[in-house]
Amino acid sequence: MTRPDAETAARSLIAERFPDAWQAWLSGSVVLGHATATSDLDITVVLDEAEVHRESLVHEGWPVELFVHTESSIRHFVAKDRARRRPTMARLVATGLPLVPGDAGEALRAECAAAVAAGPDPLSAEELTFQRYSLTDQLDDLVGGGSPGVVDAVAIDVWRGTAELLLASGGWWSGTGKWLVREVEAFDAARGTTYATHLHDGLHAALAGDPGALVELADEVLEQVGGRLWSGFRLAATIPD
């Protein structure tokens, strides 16, 4: 069966299931130009009143990730995402293609775009110290070696920890999976650096048995924030009453 294009399918879904929506946006890979054969439709729906939820479904041959919200719940999740340094909710709205005619939702979309542009809050001293310590510990494990499965797992952790520290110390958004890679690529594009390529090459070399390049890159990022940290690290525990 031939399925309709992404925008047509998205508008059809909104008309069928959410005729009272005051706005909805189609976002994600099909809008940003990263679509693959398995890409789904990310659709955010805003209602005056709603049971806020996320739902996966298939509509007219398209896999759909549906995010049902109110205006206040979107603001709640934008703030929550800011605290975890991942602009998921704000980006869904800010980069979305409006599906309901008219200018409803433009103020909210502008608000979300401003949140994305502002970036996350700076790392606290405690957060930076912990990230330095964690990456130092992972580097020690990588150099220490072990079974192939263990070394591969640690190499992936070093790759991830290096990328996350680079972005956080640079005042940039972070992400998981493909979005972590895309954030590093965006960081490179803005700063004129090539960290995404070096991270990719370093990880592949480490998985092939040569962790040297990945270790060198991790140390380069660590040096920008004070270098490795292990001896003397201390983290106090907070115990609820």
Image (tube, helix red, strand yellow):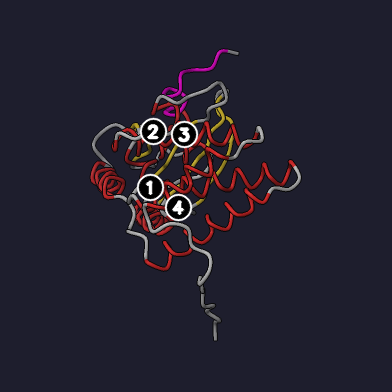
Is residue 10 within the magenta segment?
A: yes
For label 2, the residue is: 194
Q: How far is disc 2 from disc 1 in space, using C-alphas?
A: 17 Å
Is residue 193 within the magenta segment?
A: no
Q: Which residues are magenta?
A: 2-11
Q: Find residue 51 and report its horizontal and vertical position in percent.
A: 49, 54
For label 4, the residue is: 50
Q: Earlier in the sequence, mark 1 or mark 3?
A: 1
Q: Quadrant of the C terminus?
A: bottom right
Above or below, comparing residue 73 to residue 205 in the picture: below
Callout 3 secondary element: helix
Q: How far is disc 3 from disc 2 in space, using C-alphas?
A: 6 Å
Q: Find residue 202 and report its horizontal and vertical position in percent.
A: 53, 35
Q: Are marks 3 and 4 in contact (CB under 8 Å)?
A: no
Q: How far is disc 2 from disc 4 in space, using C-alphas?
A: 44 Å
**Mark 1 vs mark 3: in front:** 3
For label 1, the residue is: 173
Above or below, comparing residue 157 to residue 137 in the picture: above
Q: Earlier in the sequence, mark 3 or mark 4?
A: 4
Q: Earlier in the sequence, mark 2 or mark 4?
A: 4
Badge 1 density bin: few <14, some 14–19, many ≥20, Cα 10 Å: many
Q: Earlier in the sequence, mark 4 or mark 1?
A: 4
Q: Residue at x 48, y 53 (%)?
A: 52
Q: Are marks 2 and 4 in contact (CB under 8 Å)?
A: no
Q: Quadrant of the N terminus?
A: top right
**Mark 4 vs mark 1: in front:** 1
Q: Residue at x 35, y 55 (%)?
A: 75
Callout 4 secondary element: loop
Residue 198 image label: 3
Q: Amino acid at mark 3?
A: His
Q: Find residue 37 and report its horizontal and vertical position in percent.
A: 56, 21
Q: Residue at x 38, y 33 (%)?
A: 194
